Image (cartoon, rainbow, N blue to C red):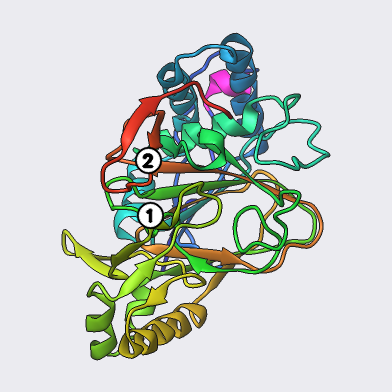
Amino acid sequence: MNIIAGPLTKLTKEVIDGFTNDVVEKLIYSVTPIKSNGVNISVEVSVEQKNHWKKELCNLTQQIKSASDIELLVDEVSMIAGKYLGDLKLITKELRNGKGYVVIRGCPVDDGLNELPTSISRPKNKSFISESVLLGVTHAIGFNPYGFKQEKNGALVHEITPVTGKEETASSNGMVEFMMHADGAYLSRDIRPETLSLLCLIDEENTDTRLVTINSILSELEPKSLEMLSDPNFFHVPPNTFDVGDEANSLGSILDKVDGLWEMKVATHSCEPKTLAAKISLKEFINAAESNVIAHSWRPGDLLIFNNFRCLHGRGEIKGKRWLQRCYGSRKVNVGEIINLNLNPACPETQVVTPAF
């Protein structure tokens, strides 16, 4: 039986009495045989909790939206988010050692979200609720939000919606099918995103995000393929959302064992095998991934966070309006750092900047 984080079953008297105190009791977890979409742990935030969470963020962002101290912003929204997420250790354990993904339903989002951004920049007239939720949740469960200077203008929070002129690209800027991949597969492990947090603002036509876990893939691989995939037989190519050159291509494995756990890094649409044997093994890997996909159907306020080392993700063709936001998380990179790749993933420079939100 899976352990599912059930709906909120108890609020403190202070909250029920009208938000007179910022103290909110932790979500109470219950054991229930929910198997809706294969999610192992799902947190449901009640309407009362969501409204209080949003009220706190509104008060905070009015005070600090022009501040330059990104660490202060992340710390503050993290403290707020932590009050609504329940057992933080359980969520973190699931991400690191379990299936590797958690859904949080009912998160607050901004009012008046009608028009999608048409570029990689956030709309200037948008408030900061969803960004604060993404940064807060990511940091509250133990991961530091960060970004790359060469991606999305160095933003900490990325707009994941079709970009004018990029609709036909297989990327977060496009509308065409985006095959299963790990973000930053070409990067060295110390700066590759460990987690991705995705928050739904709009999804008119229910374009699912697809996930597959590493354990479900490994169970279908032949030993010979496992060995081939664990050796440096594959060229990893940067996605076109990164403003880097061909010099950034890297030769490496797809599977790695780190601290006793298997990890994977690959963009299945662009990875180039070095030999015919590597090509056959990659095909077997892709078939195993595609046969074990779990589809997450979005509704506004859904936040999906997953381990980028142990899960691949993708989506089908986008139809209708669709707007997600994304945040990277790491335990190795400092809070708010924007990494300057300088066309050399192994030796990055870092700098702290004001969030481009």
What residue is disc 2 on? 342
Q: Is the residue marked by circle 2 packed among few (<14), some (14-19), or many (20+) residues within 10 Å?
A: some
Question: Magenta span: helix, strand or loop, mainly?
Answer: helix
Residue 265 in the magenta stretch? The answer is no
Q: CA distance from mark 2 to mark 1?
A: 9 Å
Q: Which residue type carries mark 2?
A: Asn
Residue 158, x across and y down, in percent: 58, 41
**In front of the other: 286 or 142:** 286
**Which quadrant of the view contains residue 13?**
top right
Q: Secondary structure at mark 1?
A: helix
Residue 36 visible to an observer of this rendering = no
What residue is disc 1 on? 248
**In front of the other: 267 or 157:** 267
Residue 59, x across and y down, in percent: 62, 14
Q: Is residue 187 above or below residue 284?
A: above
What residue is at 45 percent from the left and 20 percent from the top? Answer: 70
Q: For this view, does 307 lie left or right of residue 9?
A: left
What residue is at 56 percent from the left and 33 percent from the top? Answer: 133
Q: Does the residue at mark 2 contact the one at mark 1 (Cβ under 8 Å)?
A: no
* Magenta segment: 12-17
* Residue lying at the far top of the rendered structure: 63
**Which quadrant of the view contains residue 312?**
bottom left
* Residue lying at the far left of the rendered structure: 259
Precedes in sequence: disc 2 or disc 1: 1
Q: Which residue type carries mark 1?
A: Ala
What residue is at 59 percent from the left and 15 percent from the top? Answer: 65
Q: Is residue 145 above or below residue 319?
A: above
**In front of the other: 107 or 159:** 159
